[in-house]
Image: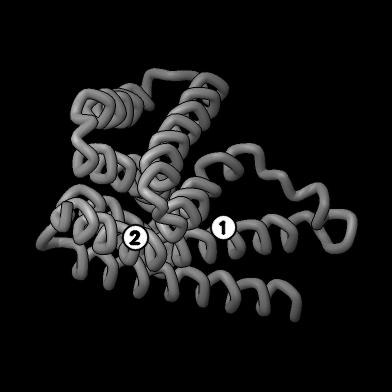
Amino acid sequence: SMASHVMDWVTSGSHSVLCATALHSSYRLFKDHRGPSVGFFLLGFSATLCLFHASTLQREAEWTGEVLAPALVSFDLLWLSQDHNTARVLLCGSCLLLGLSDWLSAETLTVLTRSLGLSSLSCCLTVCLFSGNAIGAAGGVALSLPLLLAQRADTNAFSLLISPPAAEGLMKYLLKGSLSIGCWLSTKALNKFLLDVTDQ
């Protein structure tokens, strides 16, 4: 149908934009911010896989990128602000979740994923609010949205207006857009934060 063709184009477009934004951000951050650079590379890589519909690997890569990107941005902010212990705990928690994901039930994985997303976001917001880095706070929220919302598939609001598959497609499109904005804002915020820290 016409609607499904339109949604396919919209979805492909959102993956293409995320791929370009994430890989560009990864390249720009590589010299001074290796952690976030890796996180954004994974987001870009997973968006590339989505364009080629590599199903099983695609879902794994998407989830891994969505877990690691915000966690590694928060890790970098914490590390630069000299809070090394919290940074290590956050990194270890992220790696544990990735390592144990195959052994956890779907429900437990959803709860732990959301918990990690909230922890990562709260660390990012704490550092950014104390340092007056509003761009970083906005970027942290944008990067964390898919992690906090995706598993819930909260499409009820859209489903009242359009068909459930279209509602799901629209939700995915909005979350990919959120990730793209998050990559762009976080890149600016990390570079600004590094300048602020080195100026002190």
Label total for image:
2
Question: Picture coordinates of residue 147 (x, y %)?
Answer: 50, 42
Going 66% across and 57% down the picture, which residue do you hit?
171
Q: Secondary structure at mark 2?
A: helix
**CA–CA distance in space, label 1 to label 2:** 20 Å
Q: Quadrant of the N terminus?
A: bottom right
Amino acid type at circle 1 is: Leu
Which residue in the structure is indicated by mark 2?
A: 189
Question: Picture coordinates of residue 109 (x, y %)?
Answer: 48, 25
The image's mark for residue 40 is: none
Going 36% across and 71% down the picture, which residue do you hit?
21
Amino acid type at circle 2 is: Ala
Going 30% across and 29% down the picture, which residue do you hit?
90
Q: Quadrant of residue 151?
A: top right
Which residue in the structure is indicated by mark 1?
A: 175
First in sequence, mark 1 or 2: give its number. 1
Whether residue 55 is visible here, answered yes or no, is no
Could you tell whether 122 is left or right of 173 in the image? left
Going 53% across and 66% down the picture, which residue do you hit?
177
